[in-house]
Amino acid sequence: MPNQNQTVASTNTKGLTRSYRAPHHQVKPTIACPYCEDVKIVKDGSRATKHGTVQLYRCHFCDRRFTPGTTQHRTYPMRVIVETLSRYNRLQSLTATLEGVRKKFGVRVPTSTARSWLQEFSGYLPFLRLRESARHHSIPAHQAIFEHRLFHGQVYDFKYHRTKTDLLLTTHRSNEPLAPLRTYLDSIPQACPHELFLKETPRASQAKGVFQVGDVRITKRQDNAAVESARFVLQTVTKNKLRHETLQEFMLVNDSATVAVEVPIVLTHADVHHYRTVLGFDVPLPLGADDVYTGHIDLVQIRNGQVHILDYKPDATRVKPIEQLMIYALALARRSHLLLYHFRCAWFDDRDYFEFYPFHVVRR
């Protein structure tokens, strides 16, 4: 294993040599060549297994053919494995889980195999620590996750893990001040101003160059649980347009912090006026009296006494969506009646995680 400062050379089948500096923390992307770790790869056919087919890839650098990550040498496709894990953490019994998998994929998974998957992939399933408490919670198991489809120009599937939220707020003292967030999430189906999302209003994702972000401290990490989840579950995705919903579902069900996905937000002129005049924040958003910003937050987490707003961005190193995340944080803080101080923002993919404090952006 090369150390942090060691230069490594590898030679492909054509005799070309590439040198690179090995990182201190070896992190492979979702789909990387297992031989040379290059990420310039293409799909190259498939391999038949007993229960379906597995996608094969070819590396541009070393010209080798491979199956990605944890799918190598497995009888069952990864989508069957992930479906089994997620159904179980949706508080279904193991018997009901395997019956649901059989109906969906036409595959009979032995109970012993399912148990071995739960043990093997437990590192991606921190909700397992909460599962027993969740099953005995006052909220019935089949009502633990509330789902509501939002027709906001496009279709957004708002999902809210009611049981996990309650457990996080009541069993960790540092999270107790965040209880107003639960009130807001509970109110969304009835109180959300759905009509505003159907108008020609500016989207949070369209805001560019508004905030002074040159001196904002952004922390880059590669060992975050969100990165690990993305690296694991995106192996099952065959169409890029399914990446967001696949990752959102997996994290909502299987991690121990994500409490809601596709959370709608609205930031009004009155909100901006409050931040500027009452709190003295530097919020230079160009909103007229009747203007609003709208958007949908990919993932909302409760962690260590703070609300974390996460946005999945493929190839996260090439983007810097600070304006978008700032609008999300400003809006969610106002809608939930929480202090902006309680929020963190981050964007990530299957390799990197970038985080900053929105409070530091507006409070000079």
Image: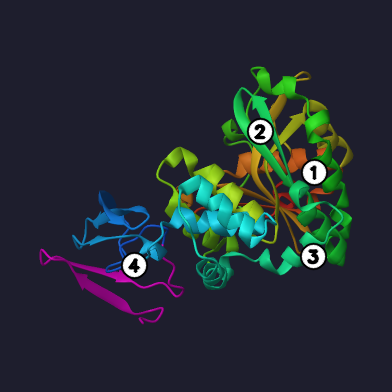
Disc 1 element: helix
What is the spatial separation of the Cα atoms under label 1 and label 2, in whole angstroms? Answer: 14 Å
Task: Please rate how many residues cluster around mark 3, counting C-alpha atoms within 10 Å: few if below 14, some from 14 to 19, many from 20.
Answer: few
Which of the two discs, 1 and 3, labels the residue nearer the N terminus?
A: 3
What is the spatial separation of the Cα atoms under label 4 and label 1, in whole angstroms? Answer: 47 Å
**Is 51 left, or right, of 209 in this rendering?**
left
What is the spatial separation of the Cα atoms under label 3 and label 2, in whole angstroms? Answer: 33 Å
Disc 2 element: strand
**On screen, 229 above or below 284?**
below
Viewer-closest of 135 and 146: 135
What residue is disc 1 on? 333
Residue for point 87% across, 66% down: 173
Residue for point 57% across, 31% down: 206
Q: Which mark is residue 133?
A: 3
Write the start and end of the magenta stretch as one range: 1-28
Decide whether residue 27 is among the magenta residues.
yes
Q: Which mark is residue 73?
A: 4
What residue is disc 2 on? 295
Which of the two discs, 3 and 2, labels the residue nearer the N terminus?
A: 3
Which of the two discs, 1 and 2, labels the residue nearer the N terminus?
A: 2
Viewer-closest of 203 and 148: 148
Q: Position of residue 190 (x, y in %)?
A: 82, 29
**Is 326 left, or right, of 183 in this rendering?**
left
Disc 4 element: loop
Prevailing secondary structure class for the magenta stretch in the rendered image: loop
Foreground mark, 4 or 1, reads 4
- Amino acid type at mark 2: Gly
- Amino acid type at mark 3: Ser
Contact flag, marks 1 and 2 (Cβ < 8 Å) = no
Which of the two discs, 3 and 4, labels the residue nearer the N terminus?
A: 4
- Amino acid type at mark 4: His
